[in-house]
Image (cartoon, helix red, strand yellow):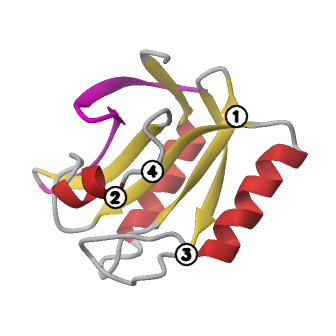
Amino acid sequence: MPGVLRLPARLHRELIGAAAASPDEEVCGLLGGRDGRADEQLPVPNAVHRPDAFDMAPAELIAAMRHLRETGQELVAIYHSHPCSPPYPSATDIAANQYPEVVHLIIGREGGEWRVRAFWLDGEIEEVGIRITN
């Protein structure tokens, strides 16, 4: 388990932009890459269309996972937004987590600003550092 997620500045901006553009429901998806570095954002529609929960649409999630496999990428992180709360795992995030071996990146509002934080959710919450790269 890497202690730092390397996130290109371009992806950081895209994730914040997607979250800001969707104030009425959580956005979600996958980040593909290798060795703890995210290289590609794969948005997946939120099947429940709620501002306080997400469930990735099954067909699109399968297609995103297939894309990762076909391009030789790893699932580096699962991301979602908290349009109305800070970027910290909710009780729902923890209870619904099916991928404890994958970093969970959350985009949320903190002090009026969009922030991005990452966590391991394997029964406990452990924050993962994010290094913004070029």
Select label 2 or label 3 by which is in front: 2
Residue 107 x, y percent position in the rendering: 34, 52
Within 10 angstroms of label 3, few (less than 14), some, or many (20 or more) residues? some
Say which label, 4 or 1, has the lower sequence index.
1
Q: Can you say whether 72 is above or below 131 in the image?
A: below
Identify the amino acid type marked 3: Pro
Residue stretch rendered in magenta on the structure: 112-134
Indicate the quadrant where residue 20 lies.
bottom left
Q: Position of residue 26 (x, y in %)?
A: 36, 70
Amino acid marked by disc 2: Ala
Disc 2 designates what residue? 96
Residue denoted by label 1: 33
Q: Is residue 116 above or below residue 43?
A: above
Residue at (21%, 46%) from the top-left corner? 88
Q: Secondary structure at mark 2?
A: helix
Say which label, 3 or 1, has the lower sequence index: 1
Could you tell me the amino acid type at mark 4?
Answer: Gln
**Residue 27 is covered by the magenta coloring:** no
N-terminal-most mark, 2 or 3: 3
Gap between marks 3 and 1 measured at Cα: 20 Å
Q: Earlier in the sequence, mark 1 or mark 2?
A: 1
Q: Which image quarter: residue 76?
A: top right
| C-alpha separation, residue under disc 4 versus residue under disc 1 | 20 Å
Which label sits on residue 45?
3
Q: Where is residue 73 drawn, in percent x and y?
A: 77, 37
Pointer 4 and pointer 2: residues touching (CB < 8 Å)?
Answer: yes
From mark 1 to mark 2, how far is it between C-alphas?
24 Å
